[in-house]
Amino acid sequence: MLKIYFICSFLIGTALAFNRFRPVKIALLSLFVTLQGIMTLHVIRNRGTGFWYFNADSLAVIFITILFFISALSIYHSFAYLKWRQKEARERNFYFAAMVILVAALTCAYCANHIAITWVFIEITTIAASFLIYYLRTDLALEGTWKYIFVCTISITFVFIGILLLGIAAGPAGITDLTYAQLTANASRLDPFWTKMAFIFIFTGFTAKAGLFPMYTAGIDAKDKSPSPAGALFASGIMNVGFCGIFRTYQFIALTSSAEWARSVLVISATISIFIAAVYMMKVDNYKRMLAYSSIEHMGIIMLGLAMGGIGVFAALFHLVLHSFIKAGIFYQTGITYRVFGSKLVSETGGYFRISVSGSMVLLLGFFCVTAVPPSGLFISEFLIFTEMFRSGYIWLMLAVMALLTVIIWAFGRKIMKVIFTPVNGFDYENAERPALSESLSQFAIILFIMIMGVCPPQPVLDIIHAAAGTLAR
């Protein structure tokens, strides 16, 4: 099924790139969303099965399900965004083609059971994402694109070096096939020194996609310079594929004598990431960049949960699921805000409540959800992660992270309240565009889902997250 899916996705993407007719474009995109839905149902119904170097395990099911909903919504919101930007048909065609290829590459990367296959498809995501970042064809978009390509090229080189070192580490164990299953089964036989070297290179490389220190800079410009619907995909699908690479590597590292060392690497990267987010969110004036730094903060929290083990692993995956949805929802709304005010700067945006009550409520409720205010489901995951940190003896680190999160909430809240309630001098509120309520419905649905997950989460969702968390040694 995966082979058919990838071939069909490639053909649809190619057809979109060269198509000139709007009805055909809509038909092709509808076909792709349907194909993505079929693929999602297939991996859900056939969890644990695979072929060649692919395997639809519980982690893949989680990420592919998230990707289906976010990709469908991103395609839907892209039509309004592209209509506003009024670019040439050829540029719009390449935008949708790149989005289709990006989603297909992410799907295959999630299912990959071989670290080299993961590497290949993550490299494809870099190429596809670059087209989305450069869509506006401005000097800033070009700068952001080249920054993204440069950082991701370095990071993917690190991963490649890590794979070579992992091959050396696997030599004494007689492993000739670097599948995650083989590496996990023979983890105790891996050479300790080369295993540590391999992990530090692989982890560093994947941080570019995950949005973690040290390679986090790639995602900041990508989310800022790209169209908001594409930014939603970057804040969910691409960050998730980075986490997926780290998680699958940590799965077998946790079974080796290097487990505590690797755990320290995760904790250090996570803590520095949260600190960086706190510093930049206090001074950044661009609300899309603010959301990008917020994503760094959340990925730092997720890494802390992963490093703590125990219930922290479940909480990390739970947090990742909810963050993927709520951050995408806020990105969709900021695209509408940008359209209304013509600026991404907080200092030039304000009084949004006078223009769109529904849009303002999305930003307000989205702020409460993303900052883990009850009944947001993110409150549950953060509470569980802090509980596990306390149990594991990381009390001072827990208090330091709490202090940083307090700073982040203050900085985030101050700016989002300004956007919603404080009028901007000189802006014509009477003649401003009034966004339709229908444009905010998807975000209200996401917010409702986040709150349901915080009050009475569906058991099937908890079961699949527990199953994925259970694959990691405690």
Image (cartoon, rainbow, N blue to C red):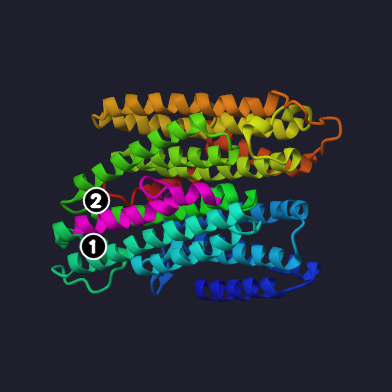
Mark 1, residue position: 185
Q: Is residue 139 above or below residue 263?
A: below
Q: Position of residue 75 (x, y in %)?
A: 67, 57
How dense is the environment of label 2, judged by Cα within 10 Å: few (below 14), some, or many (20 and up)? many
- Residue 254's disc number: 2
Amino acid on which disc 2 is placed: Ala
User: Magenta region's main secondary structure?
Assistant: helix
**Residue in the picture at 35% in, 56% down:** 205
Q: Is residue 417 above or below residue 153?
A: above
Q: Position of residue 18 (x, y in %)?
A: 70, 75
Front residue of this view, candidates 1 and 7? 7
Front residue of this view, candidates 355 and 114? 355
Disc 2 to disc 1, C-alpha distance: 12 Å
Q: Magenta residues?
A: 195-222
How dense is the environment of label 1, judged by Cα within 10 Å: few (below 14), some, or many (20 and up)? few
Amino acid on which disc 1 is placed: Ala
Q: Position of residue 427 (x, y in %)?
A: 78, 31
